[in-house]
Amino acid sequence: MGDDKPVLLSGGNPQIPKGDGDEPVRDYLEAMPGWKSEVGRRLDSLVVDAVPDVRKAIRWNSPFYGIDDMGWFLSFHCFTKYVKVTFLNGGSLDPLPPEVSKQGTVRYLHIHEDEAFDEAQFVEWVRQAAAIPGEPLF
């Protein structure tokens, strides 16, 4: 009958229904287009390794990562030319992630195709972010 692949929204971000747990996040990672899927799987793996008790969910067509009593601390989203990693409490991280936000508590990391990102620094930010209060779980 039809194609079961998720619809790609503007910028190539997969449209994945809201859901909790590993399965909807896995669906999102598999639906990320082209090179972005490999980046998404790597980000997910690094977060899980750094924060073994991480909680995963899909909200607003993006994977979110959090700690039950601490809140959400990270999400990411596909754009046409990069994957935008959002540190929801990034304004408290040291050093600050490179991209600023209009929201003072939020900072971003943009990952472009054929551009390596500093995985060790990313893991350090993840560990810091998971240890401080984030956005309430919803």
Image (tube, rainbow, N blue to C red):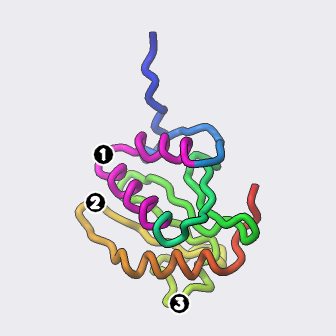
Nearest to the observer: residue 134 or residue 47:
47
- Residue 64 shown left or right of residue 115 in the figure: right
| Disc number placed over residue 82 in the picture, else none | none
Image location of residue 66, percent across then percent down? 64, 64
Image location of residue 130, percent across then percent down? 61, 75
Reading the image, the residue beneath label 3 is 94
> Could you tell me if the residues under marks 3 and 2 are in contact, i.e. CB atoms within 8 Å?
no
**Disc 2 packing (10 Å; few <14; some 14–19; many ≥20):** few
Marks counted in the figure total 3
Q: Which residues are magenta?
A: 22-47
34 falls in the magenta region: yes
Q: Amino acid at mark 1?
A: Gly
Q: CA distance from mark 1 to mark 2?
A: 10 Å
**Disc 1 packing (10 Å; few <14; some 14–19; many ≥20):** few
Nearest to the observer: residue 19 or residue 13:
19
Reading the image, the residue beneath label 2 is 113
Reading the image, the residue beneath label 1 is 34
**Would residue 104 be seen by someone viewing this image from the given angle?**
no
Helix, strand or loop for disc 2: loop
Q: Amino acid at mark 3?
A: Asp
Image location of residue 52, percent across then percent down? 54, 66
Residue at coordinates 62% horizontally, 70% vertically from top-left?
A: 88
If the image is split into quadrants, where does the N terminus sit?
Answer: top left
Q: Amino acid at mark 2?
A: Glu
Comes first in the chain, label 1 or label 2: 1
